[in-house]
Every structure is written in structure tokens, then in C-alpha cells.
Amino acid sequence: MSVTTYNVIGTRPIRHDGADKVTGRALYGADLQLARMVHGAVLRSPHAHARILRLDTTKAAAHPGVFAVVTAADFPPAPTDKIVDFGEGDTLLSSLRGNILASGKVLYSGHAVAAVAAVNAHVAAEAVALIEVDYEPLPCVLTAPAAMAPGAPLLHEGLANGNVAEYVRHEIGDLAAGFAAATVIVERELNTATVHQGYIEPQNATAFWSSDGRVHIWCSTQGSFVARDASAAVLDIPVSQVRVTPMEIGGGFGGKINVYLEPVAALLSKKAGRPVKMVMSRRDVFTGTGPTPGSRVRVKIGVDAAGKITAAQAWLAYEAGAYPGAMVGPGAMTVFACYDIENVLIEGFDVVVNKPSTAAYRAPGAPNSALATETVLDEIAEKLGIDPLELRLRNAAKEGTRRADGPRYKRIGCVEVIEAMKASAHYNAPLPGPHCGRGVAIGYWFNIGLPSSATLSVNADGTVNLIEGSTDIGGSRTSLSMQGAEVLGIRAEDVHPTIVDTDSVGYTGVTGGSRTTFATGLAVYEAAQDVVTQMKARAATLWGTKEVEFSNGTFSSGSNSFSFAQLAAQLGATGGPVVGSAAVNPRGAGGSIAGLIIDLKVDPETGKTDVLRVTSVQDAGKAIHPAYVEGQMQGGTAQGIGWALNEEYFMDGSGDMRNSSYLDYRMPTALDLPMIETIIVEVPNPGHPFGVRGVGEANIVPPLPAVANALYRAIGRRLHSVPMNPATILNL
Amino acid sequence: MKAFDYTAPVTLPEAVGLLVSQPSARLLAGGTDLIVQLRSGRKEADLVIDIKKIPELNALEFDPTAGLTIGAAVPCYRLTSHPVIQSHFPALAEVASWIGGTQIQGRASLGGNLCNAAPSADSIPLLIALGASALIAGPGGRRSVAIEDFCTAPGRNQLATGELLVAIHIPAPAAQSGAAYLRFIPRNEMDIAVVGAGVSVSIAEGVFTAARIALSAVAPTPLFVPAAGAALVGQPVSPAALEAAAQIAQAAATPISDMRGTAAYRKHLCAVMTRRALEIAVTRAQEN
């Protein structure tokens, strides 16, 4: 096997946006100030389910300092059955609009009902309080099992089956024969609570609807083009009439793909004739944006005496929130994705409930289902007396393994990840004492391709400017620049990346699906190849030759040679600027496997869990910037541990969230976790020139079951609901 | 947040005068509760009176006989870093270091923690255990109230119209005495007590001569349990004695279920936290 050596890839340069971020110069949406700008505020429903009998904005509109008031009635008319698709799945326009401003009924506590623009945020808040709404409260339903029960209150007319919006089913082989061949069969039901991504920066949007009919939106988004397209759809105007400028983003994790404020700010601006700025409070973020679904997952697995899985069955019910679209699809596709199993039946239910409409969260749907699979396998390993990693190794998916939902894997690093876990210092170290437990688990995430565009302009000083459209959440300016630098034979620091608005770069999909370093990276790679081709032609002109070689940053022909910078200095005299461009829509996204080893200690008197040691292992394909890969692994692990131990939407019976602050929504802080150790496995993705696999998501899949398995060993009892907080550990 | 007027008197009589003329005014020390409450709409204010510029409210004085006086506006960081408090009142230095994070401790005061009268307030059970009192000034002059009598309901206290807290007074520690405060939180920092226990004990020749025990987050106000301390007096120091006192404290608790914990879990924790706090206090007493 040949080993490729790189000059830039695999190194750890300082991030291009580092100085701006640490000195406070980076501009986030809340920093934006525009001439004549006014401020918006939203009226939200206090009820989880109610009919709006009367909505009167007269007093608010008449309040001094108010410029505009909008409700759902201000949306332009559009067919209610129109379907819109922004690249990551389709949705009904009526659902998209209904979530942005309620019409007819409110479907969750926090549902936006109306909005006001006023001279400042305080006056806007005063005016919001003057909006009069008469509600007829309706019975609410807050969990998937309750919503599926006969006689449950219905959220929508015309769903396929009560509150079930969608049913998915994947089946291969002969399930009955598979279970008949098993020596051990374990079936368990696991529940997870609604949790939020917990990004630090609240959603914000500023919009200006110009008198020429064009709308300019500045916002915190994972995808400027998706924000543009969704806003245009909601406002029923052509996409070319909307320009989105992505501001810096303070975290997203999937939660900043959907639009909430953008179309509202635009409608307010149209009425006010001024730019309108809107910034959510933390409570708005918790109650008015999309968390990830709570779920109930039942998994049954049969294994023969040799430790081979003979059959597996899963039943998944995910809470979509107020509108269809729980992540039960990916939950169903990933539930057994790590394993080679011949006989499988998977059924999934997308269930609407009176909670905020759910959104993506880092490998959306996969942690919920992996919790069931990986804890059931842990029980089976114990019953068979097999090491839990060995059991996984005997069943690991490989190149050619067919998943129950259809695809066959190309090269995949499942075996390599499990072997790295088995060989790790952590797995071979003893536990420190009593009341401690070690748990392991693995997980899978697909990753996606989708379109990306990039442009590279060569400067006379031998540097290049990179123009791209992927909002930078995890250091992608640098991981993209490094791929361009590698091709061009220059330093990462010699590439100057700029993320531009939707009028200034070709279509680029969301920073999501762990696709940016893969797909936009591919666009930068292709754009750099374009630059090389053009520069070779310039060298050929200068040297009067036809054949020019380029390697390691040097153009050469016979005895002639130029470094990249030397040739860049000659461009003015050889025909002018060189600009390389590429637009890609790659299909070769490589799935990523992640594993986790975690040691916990439980205080037997209080039920408090201390996290002692954690090792995250993940197949990165090829780590472009290893520090950022490690950062993704540590971040996903920290979020998964928080999800497993303490985080939840604590709702009262009426569907009001009682812990909508970071004080009481107990995410782990830096003081709650040890340094998370990382092991990067590199099984190159054949679909990318450097072998890149997305690394943003798979790492959040193993923590839930790994924590559950470790807790079992610490306390001797299996818990079946997440969060596994101190009170539930003591069964109090 | 509604617009309000702001004023910062520099003398106590000036502050009392403002409070008498505008009884709905809100007092601002560090603002770590008030500003959050105003922004969330839980409280409203027409006038906010900043008390940080009044010298007496910033005093932090220790006298070996008279004890410790903590001005109502003294921020927590002055307590955590004070050598006399570290040596004579280590439990107090600890609790001041647990209220909020480092930035919050630069603003938050024990006086504010007391006046905010949250059932879960971290400093109040310890102040009760230490036998502290609240020094109050008002139009009728000055008065002193035992800390255990200061809070009257969640968010409500003894202060009458025109009155404000001037300082908290803690008697000098007796020989062979020790105190401790422990709280349970599911995380390691930055959280609100699910249950807290503040205790103090005095020991002579292996026998408890005095003890005071109070709990937080298990009743509408921080809960003083005199019977739990009384059960220790006259008993030799032993695990059984500590456990018995912890059981009495637990029996007095009447917690509710909420987002921070169930009533059953809180009840369970009362005994655990009390016993563990007593173990620390006993060790400290034996070292003094």
C-alpha cells in the first residue's frame, strides 16, 4: 500500500479567523448595526395547544415607537400543499410557515404568534404585551407513546394516522428464522428525553426589504443558501430577490439550518421601511427553536453461540414536535448500521406532539437508536461471556455489507475503530476502585455530499484568496485553505479565506451532515487544480514550451523552474489574473464510525456520577487538521455525555418548559468532564482525493449507550431512560 | 425590561430617605439576582438604588471578641480571599466561592443572597448554623434579627418599608468549634442546590457542647432545625450521633418536586448532606 506524504494536510496551523475571534473583532449577528435600524420582538404562545379565537394587534400598532406589527395573515397567499426542498429533505410550505407564525392554532408553548418592530427592543417588548389574543386551550399531548394512543388529542387534520405523520419500514432476510437460530435473545425498550443542541449564540436575524423589492438578510445560519431559499419560499418571492449575508456563527450543531426569525424580520422590514433586527433570548431559543426528538426505541437482537448476530428487530417512535419531520428516518437507517446482519426488520414512526418542532442535532436520530442497540448488545455480551468489543468485532460492518435500508458499504472503518478501542491504553487500564464502571459503544453516521462552490484568485505575492460559502462552525476556513494549499504547494497561511454572501459565490449547501471539509474541500481542491492548469499554461508561454510539470509547489520544464510565488509574480505580464473556480456535487461522502470508552464513578448515597476517563475513537478518513478533528470528537462526546446524564426539557403537565435557562438545563461544564482523550483512525474515503470523511457527527452517537453501559457496571442495575440523572440512579 | 431611574446614595440616612419616599424602589448591590429578575420580567422597578457607594455597607471587619461583620454590599470575592475568614470561618470562604462563577463572585454579595430569600440560597443555612444576625437600618433606627427569622417566604424577608440590610454579623468562633456547608448539585459547579446543609458544632472533651443545623431547598425558606442540633448536645462524637441528627433534620424537611429534583430525592439527600457536613465540621472542630 502506498503512503502519501503531505506538506500541509495533517499539520496543525493556527486558524485564519483566530485573531478576530479572540480579540472580539469577529462580527456576530447581534453586533450588527445599520442606519435607521429598528428592533423586533415576538409574541409567543403560553399554551401548548390552543385555538386562536381572536388576535388583535390594534393597541400594539398604536403604541408610540412602533413601526410595524405582523401576524400569519401577512404572509402572501400560497397553495397550502406546496412542497419545498432545500437539499436535506422536503417539507410542506404550510408547515414551514405555520412554525414561523402560528395560524389558527398554536401547537406548543413558545410558538410564535405575532411580531412587532419598534424603535428599540424595550419598546418592542412593551408593544408585544399589548397584543390581545383569546385562546381556547385544547388538551395537549407531550410524548410519542401518548400521541399514538387511541383517543389522543390530534394536532393536525389530515395526517396519515392520527398523530403519526410517517411510517418507515426496512426489512431484509427472514426474521423468524434468524431468531430461531439464536441462542441468546434480548429485547429492551429505551426512552430518551427532548434535548437541545445548546449552542451559545442565540438565533438572530436582521432584514432590510429595499424599495426595489430585494431583501437583504444578515443572520446566524449553518447555510446561507438554505436560509435564502427558505425565506424566499415563505415570502413567496424568487430566490434571486433574497440575499443572505452569513454572520459569524456561535454554534449550530444542526439547529441553525431552519429559519425562524428571517422571514419575520423581512415582513416587518417591508412594513416599516427600515432594517429590522431580531435577537432571541435564551428562553426563546429553548421554546421557539428546534430541539432534537424525545424517543422510545425497542430493540430485539438474537445472537448464536459463536457470537454472531442472527436477527435484529427495531421499533422506533420519535417525537417530531409540532410539525412532521422527526429524525426517525435516520434513526431507523442507523439503528443497526454498524453491523453485518442478514435478518432485520426496522419500523419507525414520526409522531407529532405539542412540543417545539424538532430540528437536526449532530447525527440526528442516531444517538436515540444506538442507545437501544448498544445496550442490548452489552447485555448479550455479558450473557455469552464475550468481551463487549469482541462481540462487536465479530459482527462489524465491512466493505460490501448491506444495510437493511438498502445501501452496500464502500470502504468503511468499523473494524479498525473497534480494534483501536481494544488496543487503547484506556481499555487495558484497570478501573480505579469501587462504584466505578466502564462502558463501551460504537456508532455510525452517513455524512452527505451536496453542492459546494469555491473560487481561488492568485495574488502577485504568491498567496491566494479563497472565496467560499460554507459558514465556519468548526474551523472550516482553515481545513478548506489547507486543501487548496496542499494542491498549490504553498502554506496554509498563504491562503486567505473569505465567506461571502449568496450573491457572491456559487450555490453551497449547509454546513451540516459533516460535509464541509469533504464537499467544499473538494470544491477547493478542484479550484486549485484549475489554478494549476492555468498557471502551467503561463509557464509554458514564458518558457516557450508545451510540457510543464508541477510538483511540490514547483513548476518546471527542462532546466527551467519557478516556485508558485515566482510564477505568481509573472501573471501580470503573461495575460493577467488567474482565477480558478469549481462547483461540485459529490456523491462519495464516506460514512464515519466512532467509538467511546468511558469510566464513571457513582456516589452510592447521592447518585451523582463523576466522569473519570473518556476516550473517543473515530475514523476520519484523512484528518486534514488533526486538532480540529480532535475538537469535533471532544465536542460530540461532551454533548453526548450531557444528554446521557442530566440534560432534558423539563416540562410541566401543561407543556411549559420549566428549565429554559443554562442554569437549570444542565449541560456539562468544563468542570464536569476530564480531558477527553482521542484516537483518530484513518481509513481513507475513496470518494475524496485526500480520503476525507466527515467527522462532525458520528462522535455523539456512542456516548449515550457507553454511559448507560458504564452505569450498569457501576451500580449493578440497568436504567432504561435518558437522562440517567442522580435521582433516577437512586430510583427516587 | 421597563425603563427605570437609577440613584447611588453615599450615606445610609440618604438611602433610608429614598426608600421611605419610594417604597417600591429596588436595592442594587451586585445585581446578580436583581438584573436577571428585571430582565426576565419577574420584578419591575421604577427606581433602582445602588447601595455600593455607602461605606458602611462595604465594611468587612473582624474582632476576636466581637466577631465578623460583613457589609451588605461586600462581594463574595473579598470573603474567599480574606485571610481571617479563611482561617476562622473556612466554611464561609467555601460557600462564597460556590456562589456563581468567578465573574459573578466579583459582584454577588452575601447580603444580596440573604435578601433575595431564595429557599435554595447557599449562604443562608451556613449563616444560621454560625448563629449570625442581620443588622437592619430604617426610619425607626436600627435593629438586629437572627438569620433564621429573616426570610419569611420565597423571595420575601423581614425588611419593612424604608428598611435595608446594613450588614451580617457572625459571632467569633468558640474554641473547638467547626462549621461546614455542603450542597448537592448534579454538576460540579454553576448550579442551584438540590439540597444544602449548613452545620456548626462545638466539642469539649469528645462531647458535643453546641450544634446548629439548617437546610436549604427543602422548605419555603431556609430551614433551621433546632432539634437536630439539640440532639447532638451532650452526646459523645460518634457516627451514630451524627446519623441521628441527620435523621432529625431529614424529618423536618418538607421539599417539593421540581425541575431540580423530586421531593423523595430531596428528602433522601437531607440526611446524606447533613451527615457529611457534620463529619467535616467535627473534623474542623477537632483541629481547632
Image (cartoon, grey):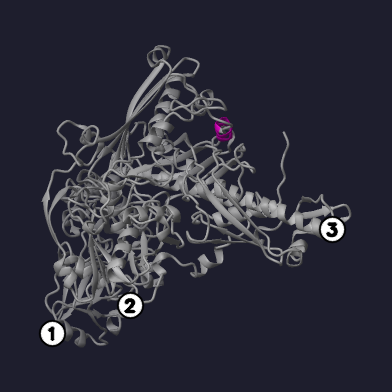
Task: Give neighbour class at mark 2: few <14, some 14-19, many 20+ (Cα, 10 Å).
Answer: some
Q: Position of residue A57 (x, y in %)?
A: 16, 65
Which mark is first along the chain, 2 or 1? 1
Left-right relation of A608 to B268: right
Viewer-nearest residue: A355 or A85: A85
The answer to whether residue B183 is seen in the rendering is no
Element at badge 3?
A: helix
Which of discs 2 and 3 lies nearer the camera? The answer is 3
Measure the alpha-carbon separation of dots 1 and 2: 29 Å
Q: Which residues are magenta?
A: A414-421
User: Which residue is depicted at the point 35% across and 52% down?
Assistant: A233
Classify residue A244 by image quadrant: bottom left
Q: Is A431 situated above or below B261?
A: above
Q: Is A280 situated above or below A304?
A: below
Q: Is B63 situated above or below A526?
A: below
Disc 2: host chain? B
* Amino acid found under the numbered disc labelled 1: Ser
**Does the magenta-highlighted stretch encompass residue A185?**
no
Which of discs 1 and 3 lies nearer the camera? The answer is 3
Element at badge 2?
A: strand
Measure the alpha-carbon separation of dots 1 and 3: 92 Å
* Amino acid found under the numbered disc labelled 3: Trp
Viewer-nearest residue: A65 or B288: A65
Disc 3: host chain? A
The residue tagged 1 is: B21
Q: Position of residue A571 (x, y in %)?
A: 74, 64
**How many labels sit on residues?**
3
| Residue contact at pointers 2 and 3, CB within 8 angstroms | no
Which of discs 1 and 2 lies nearer the camera? The answer is 1
Q: Main secondary structure of the magenta part?
A: helix
The residue tagged 2 is: B60
